[in-house]
Amino acid sequence: MKRLLRIEIVLFAVVALLSLGSVSSFAGQNYKALYQKTIKTNDGIRHQIKIVKAKLLKAGYKKNTTAVGIMSDANDQIKYANEVRTKSDKLAKEGKYKSAYLWAYQEFQYLVKAVVKLNVINNLLTSK
């Protein structure tokens, strides 16, 4: 379990470091366009998460207590992403696209954490 946690932390750190460069390069761009692009990306990630969760359910992840715990964690990340999405949508409706984009990017980060956890479950189930 500790090894899986270390792998998850390393993967998250790599994604976080790669994403830092992309945030600073957007500084002079149109935030409305960035917001819309990020929302589109997030929607694609959400779609893939649904597909993977269905496959893991079909594969019987509930039989593995470690996988159940990791799935609970992934669901928490998705819940946080949903809360942040509400904030970004509200700000976009108000025309505050810079803040909306930043919240949408926070949603992206939560979704990436959920994806990493789902990949850990998949690897845990298929490594036998």
Image (cartoon, helix red, strand yellow):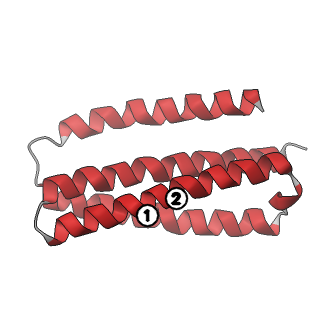
Q: Dot 2 corresponds to which residue? A: 78
Residue at coordinates 10% horizontally, 66% vertically from top-left? 95
- Considering depth in this image, is 88 or 59 the residue closer to the camera? 88
Q: 123 or 98: nearer the eye?
A: 98
Where on the picture, by quarter, is residue 32? bottom left
Residue 3: image location, x then y, percent: 74, 27
What's the residue at 56%, 64% (across, down)?
48
Q: For mark 1, what is the residue?
A: 82
What residue do we see at 63% from left, 47% from top?
Answer: 117
| Residue 118, placed above or below residue 94 | above
- Horizontally, residue 84 falls left or right of residue 62, namely left
Tell me the SS state at disc 1: helix
Q: Are marks 2 and 1 in contact (CB under 8 Å)?
A: yes
Q: At 13% across and 40% down in the image, what residue appears?
A: 27
Q: Along the horizontal axis of the image, is 31 left or right of 6?
A: left
Quadrant of the rendering where the N terminus is positioned = top right
Classed neighbour count for the residue bearing mark 2: other residues with Cα under 10 Å, few (<14), some (14–19), many (≥20): many
Residue 60 position in % (x across, y down): 85, 63
* Residue 63 pos. (x, y %): 89, 58
Q: Is residue 66 left or right of residue 96?
A: right
